[in-house]
Amino acid sequence: MTYWRKKAVENLALVFPEAVFYKPTQAPLVALTIDDVPIPGESAPCSTRWILDEIAEHNQSVSDPAENVRATFFVIGSHLNRDYDLLTDIVAQGHELANHGMVDTWPAFQSRQEFEAHFHHTHDRLVEQVPNYPIRWYRPGRAFYNPQMHQVIQQAAGYEPYFALASMLPLDTLSATAEPTFTANYMAQHVFPGAILLLHGGSAERSKNTAAALRLILPRLRAQGYRITTLSNLWQAADD
């Protein structure tokens, strides 16, 4: 089943060359990405830390620090809250920050001017909290994009000229399927060398589900010989 899912992702990447769905590699690497963080209006410690803590707890069982789980957190600018140290703590723990726009919306339906303003405003808010941090990736809300959006990210200094998408259609935002065992098993069906995995924060309920799903899936992937890393680290892996 995973073979056919991988072939479907490869075919999708041919149709949409402006986006990254996976990394062609034989290395046993996958990227873990977390969308919609943090949670608007929360005080410290915010619920996003449940995800951080779950990864940190898993990493305590890893003898080689080079094998530690790393993730890319896609931040929504308007979700930044009163947990002012969250972004610096994410980076300090070896994870990556990325741009997920200013609001949780459909950016493909915005005007170029509105999209560009949201894109740069989010970028500015990220580097304001983590000065000089290199932001490399932008992921469009709902995974939809248009040529004008592509022009903006191509012109953005330091950004990869591709939209960061994923190797799976996430189901953890739906109430019927937002359950840890289902989420972990569903994710496992989309794992292959070079896969980009996707889970969600953005609310206490989603963060709790993601943390619990990670508790199930991380040891499983490690036992299968996979290293779970950031999108940038995966992108730097050797090609097929």
Image: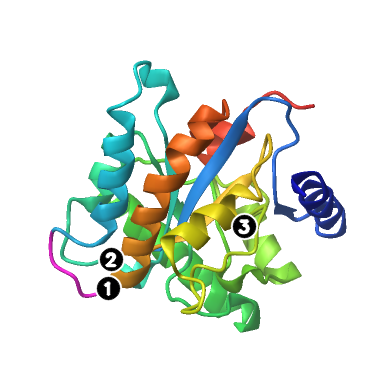
Q: Is residue 196 left or right of residue 181?
A: right
Q: Amino acid at mark 2?
A: Leu
User: How far is disc 1 from disc 2 in space, using C-alphas?
Assistant: 6 Å
Query: Disc 2 or 3, which lies upstream in sequence?
Result: 2
Magenta extent: 37-44
Q: Amino acid at mark 3?
A: Ile
Identify the residue shown where x is 63% and y is 35%: 235
Instruction: Give whichever of 154, 196 is nearer the camera.
Output: 196
- The residue carrying mark 3 is 153
Q: Is residue 5 left or right of residue 90?
A: right
Query: Disc 1 or 3, which lies upstream in sequence?
Result: 1
Is the stretch drawn in magenta largely helix, strand or loop? Answer: loop
| Crowd around label 3: few <14 · some 14–19 · many ≥20 (10 Å) | many
Secondary element under disc 1, as helix, strand or loop, is loop
- Do the residues bearing badges 1 and 2 touch, measured as CB atoms within 8 Å? yes
Q: Quadrant of residue 134?
A: top left
Say which of marks 2 and 3 sits in front.
2
Most extreme residue toward the left, as rendered? Answer: 44
User: How far is disc 2 from disc 3 in space, using C-alphas?
Assistant: 22 Å
x, y percent for residue 150 = 69, 62
Identify the residue shown where x is 13% and y is 67%: 43
Q: Amino acid at mark 1?
A: Pro
